[in-house]
Image (spheres, rainbow, N blue to C red):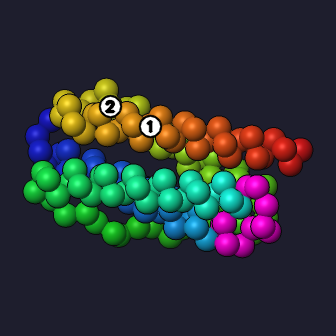
């Protein structure tokens, strides 16, 4: 896989992390102060850290991070809907990173993606625990 293709993939990931961080920050602000709001806020910081790592990989390969994102789906204004949406985002990320790790032949990129993948799995678990507690 050539450098330009890797940069394109990393930019897709960068935008996904950007969108997730904005969704999680917004949701953490409108959730009633509770365990899920604190967890959502903490995970939003993790997503921002992922953006930093991805941006560094992009720039080190001669690219520029893109900030162009689609309209955001926050999962509504209720806690259940927000947690369901957040689980969906983490699942999409897990699937995407798993696929990319198998396809990319850049050892540094794969190492970073594996680290992000592990964190996304933990995030999904944390959101699922909070959703289950609502039932």
Q: Which mark is residue 53?
A: none
Question: Looking at this view, is 1 or 21 the one in front?
Answer: 21
Q: Residue at x 58, y 67 (%)?
A: 25
> Is residue 4 in sight in this rendering?
yes
Q: Are marks 2 and 1 in contact (CB under 8 Å)?
A: yes
Q: Residue at x 68, y 59 (%)?
A: 38
Q: Work out which residue is located at the far right of the displayed protein and give it.
A: 135
The image position of residue 37, as x and y in percent, is 71, 61
Residue at image mark 2: 101
Q: Is residue 28 magenta?
A: yes
What predominant SS class does the magenta segment belong to?
helix
- Disc 1 residue crowd, few under 14, some 14–19, many 20+, Cα 10 Å: many
> Is residue 81 in sight in this rendering?
no
| Dot placed on the residue nearer the N-terminal end, 2 or 1 | 2
The image position of residue 14, as x and y in percent, is 35, 56
Magenta range is 27-36
Q: Residue at x 47, y 34 (%)?
A: 118
- Disc 2 residue crowd, few under 14, some 14–19, many 20+, Cα 10 Å: some
* Side (left or right) of 86 relative to 31: left
Task: Label 1, secondary structure: give it.
Answer: helix
Q: Is residue 67 magenta?
A: no
In which quadrant is the C terminus drawn? top right
The image position of residue 88, as x and y in percent, is 61, 47
* Quarter holding residue 105: top left
C-alpha separation, residue under disc 2 versus residue under disc 1: 9 Å
* Side (left or right) of 106 relative to 116: left
* Side (left or right) of 47 relative to 103: right
Question: Looking at this view, is 46 or 14 the one in front?
Answer: 46
Residue at image mark 1: 117
Q: Residue at x 50, y 59 (%)?
A: 45
């Amino acid at each position: 896989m050539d450098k330009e293709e890797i940069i394109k993939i990393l930019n897709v990931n960068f935008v996904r992390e950007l969108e997730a961080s904005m969704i999680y920050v917004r949701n953490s602000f409108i959730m009633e102060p509770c365990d899920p709001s604190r967890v959502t806020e903490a995970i939003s910081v993790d997503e921002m850290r992922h953006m930093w790592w991805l941006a560094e990989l992009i720039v080190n390969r001669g690219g520029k991070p893109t900030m162009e994102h689609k309209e955001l789906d926050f999962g509504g204004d209720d806690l259940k809907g927000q947690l369901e949406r957040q689980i969906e985002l983490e699942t999409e990320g897990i699937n995407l990173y798993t696929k990319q790790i198998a396809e990319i032949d850049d050892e540094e990129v794969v190492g970073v993606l594996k680290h992000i993948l592990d964190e996304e799995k933990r995030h999904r678990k944390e959101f699922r625990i909070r959703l289950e507690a609502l039932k």
